[in-house]
Amino acid sequence: MLNKDFRYLLPNILAGVTLLAQPLPATAEAPPPVTVTIDEQGRKAISPDLIGVFFEDINYAADGGLYAELVQNRSFEYQATEQLHWTPLTAWESVARDGARGSMKIADAVTVHPNNPHYVVLETEQVGGGFGLANSGFDGIPIQAGEQYDFSLSARQLFTGNHWGGKGVLENPAHLMVRLESKERGLLAEARLEISGRDWQRIGVTITATNTDPAARLVVLSQTKGGVALDEISLFPRRTFKNRPNGLRADLAQAIADLKPKFMRFPGGCLVHGHGLNNMYRWKDSIGPIEQRRGQPNLWGYHQSLGLGYFEYFQFCQDIGAKPVPVVPAGVCCQNADNQGGTGQRALPLDQMPAYIQDVLDLIEWANGPTNSLWGSQRAAAGHPEPFGLQYLGVGNEEHITPAFRERFQMIRDAIHAKHPEIIVIGTTGPFHSGTDYEAGWKIAKELRVAMVDEHYYEKPEWFLNNGERYDHYDRAQSKVYVGEYAAHEPNRANTLRSALAEAAYLTSLERNGDIVQLASYAPLLAKQNRTQWRPDLIYFDNTNLLLTANYYVQQLFGQNQGDVYLSTQITTAATNLTASCVQETRSGDVILKLVNNAATAQPIQINFSTALQIKPEATRTVLTGNPAAVNGFGKPPILAPQTTTFGGGSAFTCDLPAHSLSVIRLKTK
Ligand code: AHR
């Protein structure tokens, strides 16, 4: 626990090195030095998984975002229940080149799979230069010269020649031309495909772009007189994160990986419990061949294809060294469904609960079971025979704590305990850090001895500065805590340095309380430019660029500098604008000190480590500082980004903490 020691200790000049030549503002008076003492005696084990990420498909984070699919509405399932002007042909238009004539319509008679009920029928009466359809992607399709793209679709022939009057016999295969075109109809890439037979088949071709266009389109042209049915028309860059098929956009995935998250919570958020019972996220809908996945409306007002599904989430976790933390609905839908302001919760009828609970148990078997188990074999068939090592499972998200919720939560939790006592179930304490649902959620947690509960709060920066002692007072014998969603919200919801530093200060308190707070994740993670429902977010992006916010860099500095032992950190001031925490990473032996100065003046600091820690001289210091009102801008070099320097550390030294700064000092031990 942070011990606010008011003794004023004179600066220790032993081996002292002033680290950052940051002159104090001429008008500001330098405050007296403060001493930070790190004591090996007060060491305690803390969660090795503290800093992670929370991925939710909000702000077009999945389709059009992290999921690398370039075709929008690839399965012709957009509908007016998602957006009033949407139809199964949204993002598509028909194309007739050089005298071509034909018709295009949506059909549902013989589907590729019942989960994917609509497809498109092209009837080409006159071939000309090709009759077909074009897709505009998610605000254009970014194409890069020299890169390969994997085009694929499900297709079958309906007839050859004339629609009516034929003998019902297919006379020859149908030919398709696939083109990537720039706005001016300039050709970027081209390939041919053949469709043969009346049965749905998945076919594909790889094409290489000869030119670049950040907003190209995909054109598919029939070159045969007759009718064809097409569905699940897909275009992926070959270069995805770790080159995974059906994979993730490499730069976005790398930005998440660079946070060094110890876990990833997915797939939401409110998305999980959904807008009504029929909209709950069912994990089984998200696995298997993409043409068999059941896309559905996204509670955030668009469509989720579920192409980024449970297999992809688990694989991504493994690729970035993060533990998977899936969240399943607790048998109730979002209380805000139907715009009922917190009273719209509906519960699955009790007679449906056994089947629902079985789905949850099946998820554990799918993730961890042997390859000869029913669901473990499906994981193996998807290409991952080794278990994924599922350890945590969230049940529910921010529920209004009603008797119906409690009953269903307990049923699910008890069933998991009975069959999989090794799984850590994470319950919920409602949407806020206090109040009725928070108290009712904690009451359930205590009564049922829930292993861990999820707390959420979005508050002003001042709240985070003033509540750093929140967990100092939590009962260590009760449920552990996952701070599953938090962010400091400025009145204008901007990603200012001030908001980021408020989060940094709060994170020092989570490290100090890492014996009870086991996991913490900022929210939301991703937001697409011009497609954003919720601000602030950690990373903004368009089809070709990323914007890393000051808040991102704070998460990164804590993520890259996690420890599994907390070292008692005493600071000789009670001012809440100066906070510190010190951890040790057992694996490397490194000792890592984080210091946050939220004051408008630089702060001289004397740092003393107890001799038992045996600190070596070499050290690095990484500083994030700037104007507290500043924000990083899209398409511009970041004005807020950490800078790292090396210096001679040792067990005692002085440094200046710049005004409005986070400093991370990493030291080696002998
Ligand atoms: O992070 C955005 C939303 O905030 C989440 O979906 C929900 O859990 C919370 O209300």
Image (cartoon, rainbow, N blue to C red):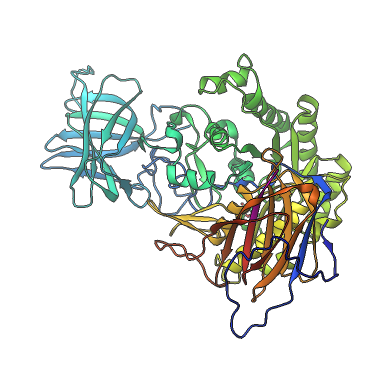
Q: Is residue 150 left or right of residue 464?
A: left
Q: Which quarter of the rendered picture does the C terminus lie within?
A: top right
Q: Is residue 115 left or right of residue 599?
A: left
Q: Residue at (18%, 48%) from the top-left corner?
A: 185
Left or right of 414: which side holds 193? left
Q: Nearer the viewer, residue 562 or 273?
A: 562
Residue 437 found in image quarter = bottom right
Furthest residue to the front?
Answer: 14
Look at the image and tell me whether residue 456 can be seen: yes
Closer to the camera, 353 or 396?
396
Q: Which residues are magenta?
A: 665-670
* Location of residue 205 in the rendering, given as x and y in whole percent from the top left corner: 29, 28
Prevailing secondary structure class for the magenta stretch in the rendered image: strand
* Residue at the extreme bottom of the image, as rendered: 27
Residue 546 location in percent, x, y? 44, 54
Can you give x and y, in whole percent of width and height, for residue 552 in the image? 56, 56
Residue 517 visible in rendering:
no
Name above or below for residue 612 compared with residue 461: above
Whether residue 188 is in magenta: the answer is: no
In the rendered image, residue 232, in percent from the top left (x then y), is placed at 38, 34
Quadrant that contains the N terminus: bottom right
Q: Quadrant of residue 607?
A: bottom right
Q: How many marks?
A: 0
Residue closest to the far top: 372
Residue positioned 39% across, 32% down in the render = 108
Q: Looking at this view, is 536 or 164 the one in front? A: 536
Q: Up-down: is 557 above or below 176?
A: below
